[in-house]
Image: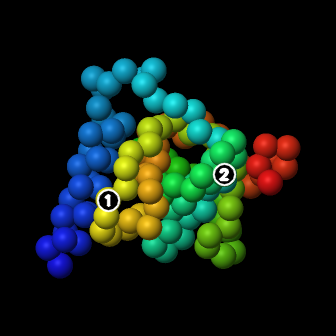
Amino acid sequence: MQRKFTGYLVILMVIGVYSCKNNTRNSSSHVMFKGVYSFGAGEQSFTECSSGREYWVADSCKQLELQYTQLKFEKPYEPVYIEVEGIKVRSGKDGLGSEYDSTLVVNKLIKITKEIPQDMCN
């Protein structure tokens, strides 16, 4: 129980450090990511188009989750194409996202669409 709590605490600290409200950071340190995002109960995953790598997603601005739910899917976990700015951090050993090597901390949603470009993401 203590380890699980520690894992959640680490994830919350990472999100807090890179949250949208942090005006002291240099926005040039953030990278643009393009890929496929899936959201549902207990899952927030992203697959980068260029490399095929999968990441757990921490949505620090809450815009990604909000925009996803506003697409009104009949079932959860439907994939969408997104373009976001963010950073990659090492995932915690416990808790949500621990099965992924890295977590993508999203700081800015640029684009979200149901149409996944086949020329970029197979």
Label placed on residue 57: none
| Amino acid type assigned to the residue bearing label 2 in the image | Gly
- Residue 93: x, y in percent? 31, 64
Q: Is residue 28 above or below residue 45?
A: above
User: Does the image show residue 58?
Assistant: no
Query: Residue 30 vs residue 19: left or right?
Result: right
Report the coloring of the rendering. Answer: rainbow
**Residue neighbourhood size for the residue with mark 1, other residues' Cα within 10 Å, grouped as few (<14), some (14–19), many (≥20):** many
Question: Residue 82, position in %: x, y?
Answer: 64, 46
Q: Secondary structure at mark 2?
A: loop
Query: Which residue is painted at 44% across and 56% down in the image?
Result: 101
Quick one: quadrant of the N terminus?
Answer: bottom left
Q: Quadrant of residue 45?
A: bottom right
Residue that extends furthest to the right in the rendered view of this protein: 119
Give the amino acid type for the residue marked by disc 1 in the picture: Gly
**Image vertical order of residue 96 relative to residue 81, above or below:** below
Q: Which residue is mark 2?
A: 52
SS at mark 1 in the image = loop
Q: Between marks 1 and 2, how big is the CA–CA gap?
A: 21 Å
Please provide percent x and percent y for residue 25: 32, 25
Q: Which residue is mark 1?
A: 92
Name the residue: 46% across, 61% down. Answer: 100
